[in-house]
Image: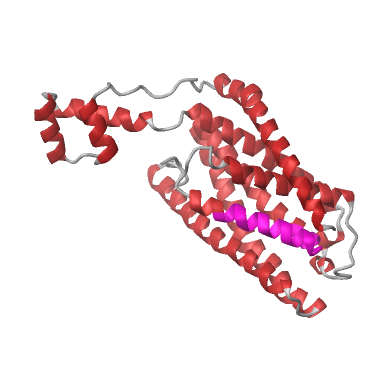
């Protein structure tokens, strides 16, 4: 591997983003309309300068005392003012159509890259014997299939890094920003240092559950609640097994201990494993959110609002 190879990810990232725009417009949007998602936003609130000022400057959720004061000031009943604030809050929420299109794009890419990763790794010796990741290191050949796998993953995460500033804002924006930085750093670092074998295992492991989450979101937006619940349960199981089971006991075990035993200490060992630990911390945080949703689902009988929902 050569460091200059990494720069080819940038034009590929631009190409992926262009494909995404076309995909969302000509494929995802018709699919959304086909399942009954309306191409319109929420009902707008009646224009009112006083209520708008309160909404923007003071609170989006007025208490009873403030509602009574506004009622006297505007000569509106309290219920009408409550309805106004509800419509105004909904007005700021992105349309379901937009969320559906974003999720369908991510579902399509995650599923495609996961299938490619499984196909590639199935014939790779280190998939069956993880110690092969370190035998002969660092003088291990870089095949064309491995190169394309790396560049596509890196380009996709670069496209996510920039598109998240124009995508729907979610509660875990900062966590996702750190995740994208750590992922890009890991992919770049492992490629330059020819740790690509263990890198492919890490990438494929992460892709194993991502497309299931997006599939559950698609079902939720389309109001297929039973399908959404089923997909979310499957996603939860796969996520916990891969991120809290396979990742620490298979991946971290080989990067922390087996690599040290087989090739000895090396300067990049600390940085590489530090980045892997950052991912593990994020895995724990997300697992908490997922378990919380699952717990609510058991109580309410259905998957509640996504904890990564819009703000």
Relative to 139, does residue 221 appear above or below in the rendering?
above
Indicate whether residue 129 is drawn in magenta. no
Position of residue 278 measured from the top left corner of the image (x, y, whole percent): 58, 64
Residue at horizontal 9 percent and vertical 29 percent from the top: 72
Looking at this view, is 41 or 121 the one in front?
41
The quadrant in which residue 62 appears is: top left
Residue 223 shows up from this direction: no
In the rendered structure, the answer to whether residue 186 lies left or right of residue 294 reads right
Residue at horizontal 59 percent and vertical 40 percent from the top: 163
Relative to 91, does residue 136 appear above or below in the rendering?
below
Looking at the rendered image, the quarter that the N terminus falls into is bottom right
Position of residue 91 measured from the top left corner of the image (x, y, whole percent): 37, 28
Position of residue 160 measured from the top left corner of the image (x, y, whole percent): 62, 44
Residue at horizontal 24 percent and vertical 24 percent from the top: 48
The quadrant in which residue 191 appears is: bottom right
Query: Which region shows up in magenta?
Result: 178-199
Indicate whether residue 182 is drawn in magenta. yes
In the rendered structure, the answer to whether residue 147 lies left or right of residue 249 reads right
Residue 100 shows up from this direction: yes
Looking at the rendered image, the quarter that the C terminus falls into is top left
Position of residue 165 measured from the top left corner of the image (x, y, whole percent): 53, 41
In the rendered structure, the answer to whether residue 17 lies left or right of residue 70 reads right
In the rendered structure, the answer to whether residue 202 lies left or right of residue 3 reads left
Relative to 109, does residue 22 appear above or below in the rendering?
above
Q: Main secondary structure of the magenta part?
A: helix
């Amino acid at each position: 591997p050569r460091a200059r190879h990494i720069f080819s990810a940038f034009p590929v990232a631009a190409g992926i983003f262009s494909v995404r725009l076309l995909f969302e417009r000509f494929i995802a949007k018709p699919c959304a309309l086909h399942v009954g998602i309306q191409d319109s936003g929420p009902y707008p609130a009646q224009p009112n300068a006083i209520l708008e000022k309160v909404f923007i400057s003071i609170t989006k959720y007025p208490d009873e005392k403030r509602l009574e004061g506004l009622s006297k000031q505007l000569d509106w009943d309290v219920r009408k003012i409550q309805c106004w604030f509800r419509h105004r809050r909904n007005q700021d929420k992105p349309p379901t159509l937009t969320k559906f299109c974003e999720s369908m794009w991510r579902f399509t890419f995650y599923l495609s890259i996961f299938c490619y990763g499984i196909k590639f790794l199935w014939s790779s010796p280190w998939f069956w014997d993880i110690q092969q990741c370190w035998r002969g290191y660092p003088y291990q050949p870089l095949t064309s299939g491995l190169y394309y796998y790396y560049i596509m993953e890196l380009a996709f995460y670069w496209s996510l890094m920039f598109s998240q500033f124009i995508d729907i804002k979610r509660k875990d924006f900062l966590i996702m920003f750190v995740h994208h930085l750590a992922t890009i750093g890991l992919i770049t670092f492992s490629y330059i240092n020819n740790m690509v074998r263990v890198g492919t295992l890490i990438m494929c492991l992460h892709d194993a559950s991502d497309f299931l989450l997006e599939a559950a979101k698609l079902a939720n937006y389309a109001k297929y609640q039973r399908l959404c619940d089923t997909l979310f349960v499957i996603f939860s199981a796969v996520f916990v097994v891969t991120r809290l089971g396979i990742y620490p006991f298979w991946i971290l075990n080989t990067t922390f201990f087996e690599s040290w035993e087989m090739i000895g200490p090396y300067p990049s060992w600390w940085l590489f494993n530090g980045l892997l630990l950052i991912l593990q911390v994020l895995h724990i945080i997300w697992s908490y959110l997922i378990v919380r949703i699952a717990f609510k689902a058991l109580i309410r009988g259905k998957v509640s609002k996504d904890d990564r929902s819009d703000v």
